[in-house]
Amino acid sequence: MAKDNSENLITKTETKKPIKRLAAHLAPPAELLQLMHRLSGCEALDAMIEVFVAEVSHAVKADRSTLLMNDVTTDELFARYAQGGVTNEIRFPNRLGIAGAAFTSGEPILIEDAYQDPRFNQRIDDQTGYRTRSIMAVPLRTIRGKLIGVVQCLNKMDGEFVPLDVETVNQLIESSSTILDGALALEQARTARDVERQFLQIVSDMTSDLDLASLLKKVMGEARDMLSAERSTLFLNDEKRNELWSQVGEGLGSTVIRFPNHLGIAGAVFTSGKSINIPHAYADLRFNPSFDRQTGFFTRSILCVPVLNKTGRIIGVTQVLNKRGGPFTAEDEQRLRAFTAQIAIGLENAKLFADVTNMRNYNQSILESMSNGVITIDDEGLIATCNIAGARIMRIDKPEDILKHKFEEFFGGPNAWLSERIKRVEKPEDQEVAMDATLEFAGESISANVSVSPLIGEEEKKLGAMVMIEDISGEKRMRATMSRYMDPGLADQLLSGGQDALGGQSVEATIVFTDVRSFTTLTEALGAQGTVALLNEYFTLMVDCITKEGGMLDKFIGDAIMAAFGLPVGHGDDEDRAVRASIQMLTELNLWNSHRNSQGLPSVEMGIGINTDHVVSGNIGSPKRMDYTVIGDGVNLAARLEGACKEYSAKLLISESTFSRLKGSYRIREADKLIVKGKTKPVTIFEVLDHRQDIPGSVLMDMLTAFRAGLGEYREGNWDRAIKCFNEALKAHQGDELSRTYIARCEKLKLDPPKDWEGVFVMKSK
């Protein structure tokens, strides 16, 4: 039977003025009436429970007792206890543990030795230091036979619990259960009333919020809390793209999630308009477990309902995951539907406000960008205004020379495509944008970013159009040339006049080192030309992964790559960028190897080390040749971690400094405490496993659980226990080479036990 983590977290009750102890036979009616009188004098359920539990403990001479009441809305048993002036509550499903067994069977349970009963959770005793010997659990019924909870007593002080103790507790229950049941019903009614009042207040607050990002965050947070779920997401429909989207996070760290509005469970709800309630996600074919594998989150239950506006049109869906205490109920679905119906108007208002604000800001930014060419055209197709930059780009002496002329005269011939776009824009959403387009003026071609926007007056009447031209010809040529010899990010810094950023400075950065395994063997098999071709193809794949995440390629060192994230300008999440880039490098390498293997070519393997630290960056070299690079201990540790990948049979190792700064969710395990060559202090290292898409989530969870246990025993010097745990990890997944490494290490340490063992491994090589 499944063990419960909370069933033996028992309230220790201080006996406050108990009635004279009941005898082992029926108690005098006067004493029972006195108990009922004391219970009736309590104003709250908590106070009643305190009085009742104190009397039970005293009556049966129990060291500790608790009263667990059943919550019919969640099918949970709950108990409350005071600690530090704060009332805490314990909850667990009413079918688990010894208390759950007594509740579901309706029969009392007497246990002489708790540690011999499989339903007992010994872990709580280990944590608290309390030793549970005997247990008595008695169902709590009203005089009408209604089952409302369980009375549980621990450690009888003068022997073991006997059937007479059950009779004594039942006698107390018979006198008190109706009062307790009434108090519970009253408390639940008050709670329901408070929830509804809070619900109305929440809806009122949210419908007045016109900031879409803020409103999305509020809706997701309130839906999660309202249904006691672990996660909640509100997806809105983008009618132009036919996509469902949502924004997660705030400010620069926010992320927009998008996917076609017919895919997945959310897509099924959006297209059908019907709610979906899935109690077991992995048993439903519509659930895609790849998201769990990517994030490390384990989805148990899902509730997804459509969001309808006042006309009945579906504008999105709300999805909540993992209800605490069990699956989502029909009542949860009704509450979520009511909630989304109330906030739909606010969502539409906020979305409309965001659209209007974005358009206003965009048009304003165009008008203020006077360094670019800005040309306006009136409703008759005549050029109304042109700034100096526009005249220069169009190779015209003065702006006045083109005013009051048809725009087709200047945007004809090779530029006719621009005339067509000007004619097409009729509404605000009809904006036309052409990036890196070619224009020709006075026989000279230029590269330009061009945008065409309509000018709209009152009653949505078109007043004309505005054309903005950004000449990027010189910058494009210079960037293309410089990017062949340096990282594109550095080229952008130099072109934007940021040379000072390339001077010497101490900054925090995340350094990435990669190296090809057995490269000498590959070169011998491929020859000179084959080696160069392989490296060019390999470097192209790897560098693309780095630059896509905003990293700076520092240098190639033979077959190795050194890259930095956070230089020359930081992003705020450079550790995550480095890890994501490294995961993508390993993923691309696997795909490339599959292609090579299909052609009969050998695979290429590599290791990656990542470290975050303060480093010195800047232009280093001689007056004739400079190289922008980074130096320092933080760089050296990243290189050592790349080398340590061989020792730990790993592909990607990161330092504790990088691990502690990660904001995203990854599949990571602690690998060791390591002293690298040239250092005296140990550093904790971690292995990132997100590139291992071949390991199912459930298998990985079992493997990591066993590995963590083995690592703990290893550090305590319990070699045999550690070996047993690592074998359990291999049993879960035979491909876990790190567990084999630890088994071999433990066998060696058994033969020659170290003195003053601290659980730290010392690397002798780089």
Image: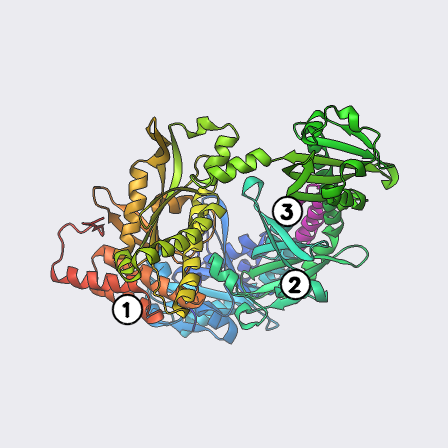
Q: Earlier in the sequence, mark 3 or mark 1?
A: 3
Q: Earlier in the sequence, mark 2 or mark 1?
A: 2
Query: Can you tell which of label 3 and label 2 is closer to the viewer?
Result: 2
Which residue reaches farthest left? 752
Q: Which residues are magenta?
A: 191-217
Disc 1 element: helix
Per the image, the residue denoted by label 2 is 267
631 shown above or below 582: above
Left or right side of 606 for 32: right
What percent of the width, then of the height, locates residue 6? 44, 61
Per the image, the residue denoted by label 3 is 218
In the image, 142 versus 317, the foreground residue is 317
Q: Please state, as top left, top right, bottom left or bottom right, where the N terminus lies in the image.
A: bottom left
Amino acid type, callout 1: Asn
Query: Can you tell which of label 3 and label 1 is closer to the viewer?
Result: 1
Is residue 487 in view from this perspective? yes
Residue density around tag 2, few if under 14, some if 14–19, many if 20 or more, within 10 Å: many
Q: Earlier in the sequence, mark 3 or mark 2?
A: 3
Query: Can you tell which of label 2 and label 1 is closer to the viewer?
Result: 2
Disc 2 element: helix
From mark 3 to mark 1, how far is it between C-alphas? 47 Å
Per the image, the residue denoted by label 1 is 727
What percent of the width, then of the height, locates residue 609? 34, 49
What secondary structure is the magenta-colored segment mainly?
helix
From mark 3 to mark 2, how far is it between C-alphas? 22 Å
The quarter of the displayed image where residue 604 is located? bottom left
Q: Residue at x 48, y 36 (%)?
A: 491
What percent of the width, then of the height, locates residue 261? 67, 60
Amino acid type, callout 3: Lys
Amino acid type, callout 2: Gly
